[in-house]
Amino acid sequence: MIKKILQKKNIFFLFAFVLAKATVFLTPILIAESLSKADYGVLEYALAGLGMLVSAAFGLGVAGAYPYFILKKKELSIENGFVLHPFWLVFLLILNQIVYYLFQGYAIEYYMAINVAYLISNQMFYSTQLKSHEINTKAVLVDAGLYIVLLTSLGFGLMTKSISIELFNKSIQFYTVFYVVYAVYKYFKTEHRLITTHYKKILKYSVHLLLSSFLLFAITVSGRMTVKEFIGDEAAGIYGYYFRIAAIVVMIHSIISILFFKKIYTLDPKVLDKYYAMFLAFIFTTSLVVFWVAPYILPDIFDFFKDTYQPNKWIFFILSTQMVLWIATALLSNIITRENLLKKNNILLVVISTLGVLYLFIMRKQLSIFSLSIFHYIIFMAAALAQIRSLYVNKIYFSRTLVVLLGTFTISAVFLYFGTL
C-alpha cells in the first residue's frame, strides 16, 4: 500500500489532494472569522446540513450506480446513459430559481441549500466517474470545487470589505452556471444510441441506492439540521464549526478511498476487514490526538475557537470520536453496494431513522447541543452495526471491524463519563 502511495503519479495526486482538502477544511473556518455566528450558522446549514441531505435526493443514487455497472458488472455499453442525468439536476436548479425569485417561496438559507445540493450532486456524479477510472487528481479538484469558489469569494470580500451572506449566495449561483454548460457539452460529445434505455436501466438499479444514500446522508448531516431547528442558527454554527475541525481526519480516509477506489469493489471481504479494522483504529487514535492538541494551537489563530471552546469542549470530543463511525459507515456502504444488499440494509436504516425521529419528537422540549451530539453519535453507531449485520446474514464477515468499533465506543463513553463529572 505504501509503495502505491509513493508512486510518481500519486505524489502529484497527493500534492493536489492536500491543496484541495486544505481548501475544504480551512474555508469554512476562515469564513466563520468574518461572519456573525448566526450568519455562519445559516451558511453551515446550507453547505453541510440541508444542502448535503437534499443532494442525496437530487442524485437519485446514480453516482453510486456508475462503479456498480462499469467496474463490477463490466457493462461498458451502458455508460452513455449516465450523460442524461445532469439534465434532471438542471431541471431542479431552474425550478429553484422560479420558486425563489418569482414566488418568493422560502428564506435564503433554503434557496442556498438547494443550489448547494445541485452543485454537490454534480460534483459527486463526476468525481465518482473519475475515481472509477483512476483519474484521481481531477477527482479531488472536482470534489473541492464549491469550496474553491467560496475561498475565492472570501478573498474578494476581504479586499473589497464586502463580506456578507449574500456574497456567498451570489458565488454559489455563479458556480451553478458552470455545471449547466458542462452538461450540454457532455451531451453533444456522447454517442446517443439507446441512451434513454440505458438511463432507465441505471435508474432501476439506483432507486435502491437512492434510499440508502439519503438515509446515510441524513445520519451524517442531520446534526447541523437538528441543532438549527431545535436550538437556533448560532448553535448550528458552533456545532458545524467543531464538526469541521474534528473532520480533519476524514482527509486521511479520502486519500485511501480515492487511491484504492477500484480495490474496494474487487478485493476479498476478509482482506478488507483486516485493513478496515487497522485503519479505523488509526483514525480513532488520530481523532483523540486532534482533540487534545487543538486547544493548545487554535485559540492563538482563530477567535471563533477561543470564544467558544470552553463551554463546548465535550461537544468537540463527541464529534472527534464520532469521526471513526462516519468513516466506518462510508467504507461499509461501498461493500453493501457492491454486494447488492441495499434493499436489506435499507430496512434497518429506515427503522433506525424512524426511532431517531420519534426520540427527537418526544424530547423536543429538553434538547441541548450536548444531548443532540450524543444522540447523533448513537445513531452513527447503530447505522454502522446495521451495515455489519446486513453483511453478516449474507455470510460476509467484518468481525475485526466490529471489534474496533465496539472498542472505540466503549473508550469514548468512559472518557465522556469521567470528563463531564
Image (cartoon, rainbow, N blue to C red):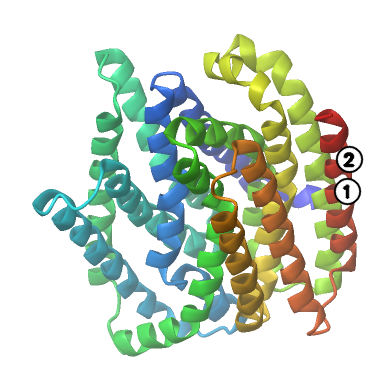
Residue drawn at 23 percent across, 37 percent down: 170
Q: Which of 159 and 235 is in front in this view?
A: 235
The answer, for residue 133, to whether it is visible in the render is no
Alpha carbon distance from label 2 to label 1: 6 Å
On residue 410, the disc is 1
Q: Nearer the viewer, residue 138 or 312?
A: 312
Q: On the rendered structure, is 76 left or right of 404? A: left
The quarter holding residue 31 reads: top left
Q: On the rendered structure, is 331 left or right of 34? A: right
Q: What element carries label 2?
A: helix
Q: On the rendered structure, is 216 left or right of 402? A: left
Quadrant of the snapshot with the C terminus: top right
Mark 1 is on which residue type?
Answer: Thr
Mark 2 is on which residue type?
Answer: Val
Q: Is residue 182 above or below residue 304?
A: below
The quarter holding residue 155 reads: top left
Residue drawn at 53 percent across, 59 percent down: 218
Judged from this view, the residue extending furthest toward the top is 300
Q: Where is residue 274 in the image (x, y as percent from the top left)?
A: 87, 62
Q: Which of 278 and 246 is in front in this view?
A: 246
CA neighbours of label 2 inside 10 A, class few (<14), some (14 to 19), many (20+)? few
